[in-house]
Image (cartoon, rainbow, N blue to C red):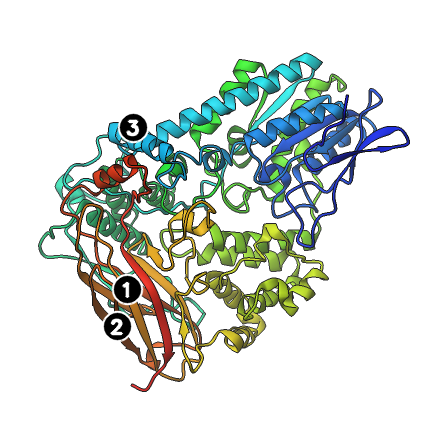
Amino acid sequence: MTARAISIWEPKTEDGATVWVRPEPGPFGDHYATRRELRPKRAELPLRVAFFGESVAAGYLYAPHLTPAGVLETQLCAVGGAANFEVIDLARTNETLAGLLATVRASFQINPDVLVLFAGNNWNLLETPEVSPYAPSAAARRELATALQAEGLAGPVRLARERLRTIAEAVFTEIALMARAVGIPVVVVVPEVNLADWESRQPVAWLPDGNPHPRPLSRLPPPLPGRGETSKKEKTSFPWTCHPEGEPREREGSGRADLSGPQILQVAEAPLRMTSVGLWYQLYRVAVEALERGDAEAAETAARSMLEIDGGSCPTAWRLIARARLARGDEAGAATAARAEVDAAAYPTLAFLGAPQAGTAVQDLLREMCRRHGFFRVDLPAVFAEHTGSPLQGRRLFLDYCHLTAEGMHVAMAAVAATVLDLSGMIESPPSWRDLVIHGPAPSPEAEATACLGAAVHSAHRLLTAGSKLPLLRHWCEAALDASPGIAATLLDLVEARSAPCPAVLTAAQQRNAASPYRLLLQHGWQWDHLDAEVIMAIRDILKDWGMEGEIDRRLLAFRAIPEGGLDLAAPPFFFLWEPLERFYPEVMRLDDLTAPAFLRCPWPETSFALLTTGDRNLAIELTVRLPPPPGEAERTGEVRVAVNGHALGSIAATARWSRSLLPIPRALLVSGLNRLTLLWPDPQAGGDPLAAAIERLDAGLTADLHPVFGELFSLRAAPATL
């Protein structure tokens, strides 16, 4: 029989025997384990565990220094003896179900004794991309239109889940048949996700005015007890209006304006007539401001009203409730709402790129596959809850949305090791997973620091929060310094790489990093092509005690300050966009089969940019904007307000046609270094039913947006000016 490749390990013949050899990784690493060779098992021992999965299983952000497979092998050998167990790591990042099946099938060439499958986080993103309003196939768009017409936003979600179930059932059935044929057990790990720290802020889809979504909200916990007797009418009536004016707050101990605080909100004296979408966003601002001032009751009340409007289809309100519950010390209620948030972040109805996380549907599907095929189950939600004493897992066990800390790896793999030891029959009284946790290897200080810095960078790229995410970024940067203070030089190199007028891989900072013990790889986001303003702010904050604030500002301004000839902050690839993920996800991912627009489309009512200046001269900005009409409408007008560092600059009139406007920025509103320039778009008033108009486009085989586009920006040119 001809030998076949096992993942990227290619077969070759050595001394008459087949060996599978791995190609050398590139200078920035790759998505696979680093084991150089794979050979068929020839003797009864060691018992060979073949380990498969996605980026969590691959040890994302720690690999190759620390991986779950390595932890598992250490734990098995600590109890069962080094000569009796081995683990073959075949996990890889971005794994799909088809890839998983192919690798499992090929792995039988090296005679495994046990299969461990650790997957599920990628399924929402990678398995059903055709169930999308941006699918390249006209037939797929028509199918989506039919689902939307019949069931509203729940239709595409159901369609994707049914497709996923069909794919998963076929894959696990074939794995079960292969494992049964050779008589080896299969262990399936049900993944858990970061419920406490990871947020999935998303825009709300188009909603019919005056017609709340009928979907029942059965998962919502009962309201928290209020502070005194408040009538139901008072709790659900929100005649709010938003005022962007207000003084910027000082971040504690920083001496710099808070560039990420919420807008000032006040109660209007009379109710305002607005669309369902407009009311939803006003309630969102109310909830965020309430959380900022510590009023959890008001925040949850506003978020519940958001759910009444969107029917629970948007993850944002669930997160606001989770935060309100946590502020009141209700971890169980927070966990319930946070899990509902994960479940609501279904790709067919998302605007922003979401994070790979296994929701309840995926977890339950994995449990069902275990029951159906007799697989042995390791249920991480239950294991982690027992380990921490809480149903709400966060940064203790997770680096980001789903990737594990060293402690998280130790606990997860201890549960796997306990199952494998029990299956092996080699230990008379197998230990419990609680006894095995202590046997996990500790990463070196340098590896721990690098993983923590990677968590900060990765969170800056993928995390969209209701409110500021700076506290979480500071946490991971501080954790990196605590683990190994020598990484301070790498923090400065990261600032330099982002500041340089060329790709990071061409900088002197890259050359220094490649030779350092804190080497940043593909997984750490080193090659990101945006400024990373939030990370730079976090680094600046935590290094202020080291006296490095001036050095960071110097590096930023050396190449990125506004030049005499001016600079377009909105030029593709949108390097200065404050939150590069605040775009429709096909435009972020740059899909080959879709043409990206030559301008910035904004699905959120605020769009911010990083403005780098010495702060000692006046500037002016020239904006070319338009307000795209809602689907089915021909015209739209409104005022676009502009602010810098929380101060209102003024507003410009805009229509559905491109127009150019000029606004001055007095130097008194600027600080030396990083400034935040924000556009506040008007509510896209819709006279008809925009979702119905979008469905018509999809039924015609055309792409369509299920979410409002608040504004479009062709250019945002900043230049020195004389005021």
Please state which amino acid type lies under the numbered disc 3.
Ser
Please state which amino acid type lies under the numbered disc 2.
Ser
Kindly give the residue lying farthest to the left in the view shown: 270
Q: State yes or no: discs 1 and 2 in contact (Cβ < 8 Å).
A: yes
Relative to 24, residue 146 above or below: above
Q: Earlier in the sequence, mark 3 or mark 2?
A: 3
Residue at the spot x=22%, y=34% of the render?
213
Per the image, the residue denoted by label 3 is 218
Per the image, the residue denoted by label 2 is 661
Please state which amino acid type lies under the numbered disc 1.
Val
Q: Judge by depth and name the residue closer to the eye, 21 or 618.
A: 21
Q: Earlier in the sequence, mark 1 or mark 3?
A: 3
Q: Judge by depth and name the residue closer to the eye, 702 or 214.
A: 702
Q: Is residue 566 left or right of residue 415?
A: left
Q: Is residue 59 left or right of residue 286?
A: right
Kindly give the residue lying farthest to the right in the view shown: 15
Per the image, the residue denoted by label 1 is 625
Q: Residue 354, which numbered label?
A: none
Q: Is residue 338 visible?
A: no
Q: Is residue 421 left or right of residue 455?
A: right
Marks 1 and 3, how far apart in space?
42 Å
